[in-house]
Image: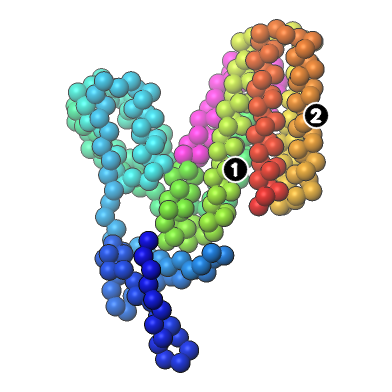
């Protein structure tokens, strides 16, 4: 942190010098335009636009790592907005097709170079073309479809469909995480995606929560398929699930309309659903039912997170 003195310039204006290192970093020179944003805690100065910023690259050594570990490192690099992700390792040949398939599952990531011991993927995402509110809406629509698909009797075809929808939800989540984090770090990107800093923090919360809701719906439906609860148990579970669906639809309505009063009611509904889960659990301590009820309870917590977000925004 540096302190700079104000210098009077004429009768009505003041100027302050900018650090040379910052100017060099953003390739700014005399006559260029900068963006000045007034926030609650002061002024933020940033370049008006990007100027040939050097591409960022990360190298991931795959030697001795499992496929899961490699994939997690790839996702982390993707979310951190590296322009290029380079995989190197003697074991890459063994996992080449699997890695190539996984890389292509990340939106905007394309394989540009490939050999027996090296693979290079580049991000072609254009942040200017991304609408964060629209993508959040798309995630919401996928969650709604997952709820509908998982309401009937659990058969393998429907379980597979719910898993595919969760896959699509994860792809959008990764892209949103990438875009939001880039905007939080860089005011230029923030202006490109047209989101203020406080909006970006809320965007990060709703995105992560929707992804978690999708995960729990997927696991709940898989448990229903695997454990085959009795008709009596399934009837009670479906009742709680229907109440959970209504709470989710209402909380998203409160989110879009910024309806604080509705969000308060949803929190109360979720508390009631949690009580019903606990009461049913006392009567039916069967392992399969217990695991399904735990997922239902977790869903209430996620829905309350969104309600809290509405109240605090």
Q: Is residue 123 visible?
A: yes
Disc 2: which residue = 272
Horizontally, residue 63 falls left or right of residue 136, namely left
Q: Which mark is residue 114?
A: none
Q: Which residue corresponds to the image point at 26% horizontal and 20% vertical from the top-left?
A: 64
Residue 112 vertical placement versus 285 (above, below): below
Residue 133 vertical placement versus 66 (above, below): below
Badge 2 crowding class, 10 Å Cα cut-off, few under 14, some 14 to 19, many 20 or more, is some
Q: Which residue corresponds to the image point at 79% horizontal and 10% vertical from the top-left?
A: 283
Image coordinates of residue 114 in percent, x first then y, are 22, 33
69 vs 16, nearest the viewer:
16
Q: Mark 2 against mark 1, which lies toward the viewer?
A: 2
| Quadrant where the image shows the N terminus | bottom left
What colour-coding does the image apply?
rainbow
Q: Which residue corresponds to the image point at 61% horizontal and 32% vertical from the top-left?
A: 213
Image coordinates of residue 187 in percent, x first then y, are 44, 60
In the rendered structure, does residue 82 fall within the stretch colored magenta?
no
Q: Is residue 243 visible?
A: no
Residue 181 vertical placement versus 224 (above, below): below
Q: Which mark is residue 206?
A: 1
Picture quadrant of residue 88: top left
Residue 279 vertical placement versus 304 (above, below): above
Q: Secondary structure at mark 2?
A: helix
Horizontally, residue 189 falls left or right of residue 28, namely right
Q: Which residue corresponds to the image point at 75% horizontal and 21% vertical from the top-left?
A: 277
In the rendered structure, does residue 155 fall within the stretch colored magenta?
yes
Badge 1 crowding class, 10 Å Cα cut-off, few under 14, some 14 to 19, many 20 or more, is many
The overriding secondary structure of the stretch rendered in magenta is helix
Q: Which residues are magenta?
A: 148-174
Image coordinates of residue 200 in percent, x first then y, are 54, 52
Give me the C-alpha separation between circle 2 and circle 1: 23 Å
């Amino acid at each position: 942190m540096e302190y700079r003195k104000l210098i009077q310039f004429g009768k009505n204006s003041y100027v302050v010098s900018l650090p040379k290192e910052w100017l060099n970093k953003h390739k700014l020179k005399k006559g260029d335009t900068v963006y000045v944003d007034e926030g609650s805690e002061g002024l933020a100065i940033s370049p008006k636009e990007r100027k040939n910023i050097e591409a960022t690259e990360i190298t991931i050594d795959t030697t001795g790592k499992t496929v899961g570990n490699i994939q997690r490192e790839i996702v982390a690099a993707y979310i951190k907005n590296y322009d290029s992700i380079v995989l190197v390792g003697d074991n890459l040949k063994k996992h080449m097709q699997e890695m190539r398939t996984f890389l292509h599952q990340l939106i905007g990531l394309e394989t540009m170079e490939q050999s027996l011991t090296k693979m290079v993927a580049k991000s072609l995402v254009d942040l200017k073309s991304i609408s964060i509110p629209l993508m959040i809406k798309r995630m919401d629509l996928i969650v709604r479809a997952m709820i509908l698909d998982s309401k009937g009797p659990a058969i393998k075809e429907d379980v597979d469909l719910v898993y595919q929808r969760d896959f699509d939800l994860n792809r959008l989540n990764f892209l949103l995480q990438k875009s939001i984090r880039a905007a939080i770090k860089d005011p230029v990107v923030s202006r490109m995606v047209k989101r203020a800093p406080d909006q970006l923090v809320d965007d990060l919360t709703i995105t992560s929560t929707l992804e978690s809701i999708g995960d729990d719906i997927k696991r709940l439906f898989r448990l229903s398929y695997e454990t085959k609860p009795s008709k009596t148990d399934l009837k009670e579970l479906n009742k709680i699930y229907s109440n959970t669906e209504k709470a989710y639809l209402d909380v998203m309505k409160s989110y879009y309309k910024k309806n604080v009063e509705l969000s308060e009611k949803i929190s109360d509904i979720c508390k009631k659903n949690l009580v019903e889960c606990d009461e049913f659990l006392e009567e039916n301590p069967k392992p399969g039912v217990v695991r399904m009820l735990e997922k239902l309870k977790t869903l209430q917590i996620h829905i309350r997170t969104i309600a809290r977000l509405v109240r605090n925004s």
